[in-house]
Image: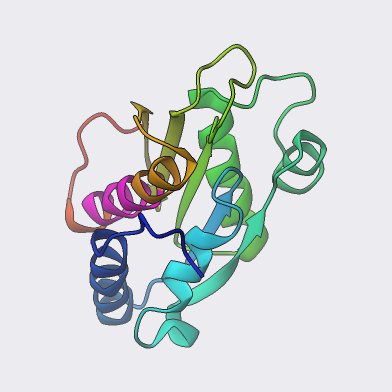
Amino acid sequence: MFPQTYDTAAPEAAEKISRLSQDRGLTVAAAESLTGGTLAACLAAAPGSSDWFAGGVVSYQTRTKCEVLNLPEGQPVITEAAALAMCQGVAELMRCDAAVAVTGAGGPGPQEGHPAGTVWVAAQVGEHRRARLHHFPGDTGAILARTRQHALELLLTLMTTDNPEGTS
């Protein structure tokens, strides 16, 4: 299901997200582009996911990001604003308490003038939102594995922080 470079960090984070979601009665959704559904698959594979994981949107084309996740037309998709809009869009669509989103250039070539490995991850829990820019080295499989890992870790950080610093 996952590229060979997929490591154990993302499933471990997903299991922690599962425990926290079940303990707190939270629901979670995912919006993804470059990871093509593997971020949602990681969440769905966590224990008890049918109780807390509402689902995900794979918005590979820009048109889908705009029509389904309410990304403003004409906006570049490899930006902090796009990642946050995707996160908010999927949370609203799925009526969830928490969400995670990823967008970027997975490779092998550049996209929107960004080199492969340029990735924005975003997460929100309630009104707390955060986005992070990453520049991951390696081939496409390595970039996607790191994207999943960092996205889930960001969501986990927001879920375990009472007053998240740097959120809007």
Q: Is residue 27 visible?
A: no
Q: Residue at x 58, y 69 (%)?
A: 55
Q: Main secondary structure of the magenta part?
A: helix
Q: Left or right: where does residue 147 sit relative to residue 73?
A: left
Picture residue at 52% right of the left edge, 61% below the top:
38
Residue 64 in percent (x, y) is at: 78, 44
Q: Position of residue 153 (x, y in %)?
A: 26, 51
From the top left corner, tell me how far across and down residue 1 is, in percent: 51, 70
In the picture, measured across the screen, residue 106 lies left or right of residue 154, that is right
Q: Quadrant of the C terminus?
A: top left
Indicate left or right for 16 with 14 as reference. left
| Viewer can see residue 63 | yes
In this view, the residue in front, 30 or 4, is 4
The part of the image, by quadrant, that contains residue 54 is bottom right
Q: Quick check: 25 above or below 141? A: below
Residue 82 part of the magenta-drawn span: no
Magenta range is: 148-158
Of 139 and 114, the residue lying toward us: 139
Position of residue 37 in the picture relative to residue 116 (left or right): right
Q: Which color scheme does this rendered protein use? A: rainbow
